[in-house]
Image: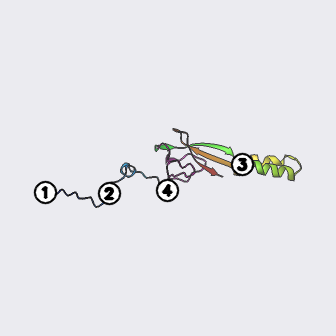
């Protein structure tokens, strides 16, 4: 006598862990540090997001720094004005700043917002 076992597959696959937990970061990959996925647009203030490295729901830590364009603009203005005090303007104008968003848990860089 032969015994046949049949196994039926379900019509749809089971959800992944991320889907079962209720969140899927759209378009982000593990290890990505340039994409900041959030409900609000990132800017000067910290945002609530999911860290792609430690996969924890966090509020980003923000640090404001001078962008590299401020150094270039200061150098150009200094030569154009023959060393007058105008070369300090890129250091005063907030448009040359960059806001760096990072994870407070794993300290991973999540994105840079140029103002």
Q: What element carries label 1?
A: loop
Residue 114 shown left or right of residue 80 in the figure? left
Q: In whole angstroms, how far apart are the C-alphas of marks 1 and 4?
A: 51 Å
Q: In this figure, which residue is indicated by the disc labeled 1?
A: 2
Left or right of 44 on screen, residue 68: right
Helix, strand or loop status at disc 3: helix
Instruction: Kindly report the distance in space between the C-alpha atoms of the residues bearing marks 3 and 1.
Output: 76 Å
Count residues near mark 2 (Cα–Cα under 10 Å), then give few for <14, some for 14-19, many for 20+: few
User: Mark 3 = which residue?
Assistant: 68
- Quadrant, the N terminus: bottom left
Disc number lying in front (1 or 2): 1
Residue farthest toward the top in the current orientation of the protein: 105
Q: Is residue 37 magenta?
A: yes
* Residue located beneath label 2 in the image: 13
Mark 3 vs 4, N-terminal side: 4
Residue 14 spot, x, y in % from top left? 32, 54
Q: Distance between the residues labelled 1 and 2?
A: 31 Å
Local crowd size for mark 1, using a 10 Å CA cut-off: few (<14), some (14–19), many (≥20): few
Q: Disc 4 marks which residue? A: 27
Q: Crowding near pointer 4: few (<14 within 10 Å), some, many (20+)?
A: few
């Amino acid at each position: 006598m032969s015994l046949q076992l049949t196994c039926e597959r379900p019509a749809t696959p089971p959800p992944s862990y991320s889907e079962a937990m209720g969140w899927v970061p759209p378009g982000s990959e593990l290890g990505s540090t340039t994409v900041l996925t959030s409900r609000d647009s990132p800017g000067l203030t910290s945002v609530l997001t999911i860290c792609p490295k430690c996969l924890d729901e966090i509020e980003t830590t923000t640090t404001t720094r001078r962008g590299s364009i401020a150094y270039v603009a200061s150098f150009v203005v200094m030569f154009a004005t023959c060393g007058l005090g105008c070369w300090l303007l890129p250091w005063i104008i907030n448009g040359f700043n960059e806001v760096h968003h990072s994870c407070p848990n794993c300290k991973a860089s999540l994105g840079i917002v140029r103002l």
